[in-house]
Image: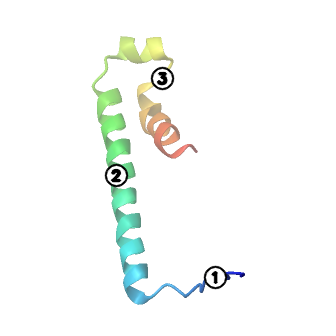
Amino acid sequence: MAHASEIILAQAGLSDRFVATIARWKENFATRQTYRNTVKELSALSDRELYDLGINRSSIRLVARMAVYGN
């Protein structure tokens, strides 16, 4: 006896899209918070410490963006 199952793919309903949007907002918020913390921590370093890391004070935001967002 053969058994067949059928999977029906339904379009995401309004509530599913809403939940996905909220999850995306939370993820974006967490990523942005990581960026802000990275900038804060790098800014707290002395010029000598930044020099040892090979970072100019003027490039802190660029380095933080590259570290968090990858671009």
Mark 2 secondary-structure assignment: helix
Q: Report which quarter residue 36 is drawn in.
A: top left
Mark 3 secondary-structure assignment: loop
Q: How far, Cα to Cα, is label 2 from label 1? A: 40 Å
Mark positioned earlier in the residue sequence (2 or 3): 2
Q: How far, Cα to Cα, is label 3 from label 1? A: 59 Å
Q: Nearer the viewer, mark 2 or mark 3?
A: 2
Q: Amino acid at mark 3?
A: Ile
Residue under numbered circle 2: 30
The numbered disc on residue 5 is 1
Q: How far, Cα to Cα, is label 2 from label 3? A: 25 Å
Residue farthest toward the front in the current orientation of the protein: 1
Mark 1 secondary-structure assignment: loop
Residue farthest toward the right in the current orientation of the protein: 2
Mark positioned earlier in the residue sequence (3 or 1): 1
The numbered disc on residue 55 is 3
Q: Is residue 52 left or right of residue 9?
A: left
The figure's colour scheme reads rainbow
Q: Nearer the viewer, mark 2 or mark 1?
A: 1
Q: Which residue does the image show at 31% across and 20% down from the upper left?
A: 45
| Foreground of the two, 20 or 6 | 6
User: In the image, is residue 12 above or below residue 53?
Assistant: below
Q: Which residue does the image show at 37% across and 80% down from the upper left?
A: 18
Q: Report which quarter residue 10 is drawn in.
A: bottom right
Q: Amino acid at mark 2?
A: Ala
- Measuring from the top left, give residue 34's x and y in whole percent: 35, 43
Category of crowding for the residue at label 3, using alpha-carbon neighbours closer than 10 angstroms: few (below 14), some (14–19), many (at least 20): some
- Measuring from the top left, give residue 1's x and y in whole percent: 71, 82
Q: Which residue does the image show at 27% across and 25% down from the upper left?
A: 44
Category of crowding for the residue at label 1, using alpha-carbon neighbours closer than 10 angstroms: few (below 14), some (14–19), many (at least 20): few
* Quadrant containing the C terminus in the rendered view: top right
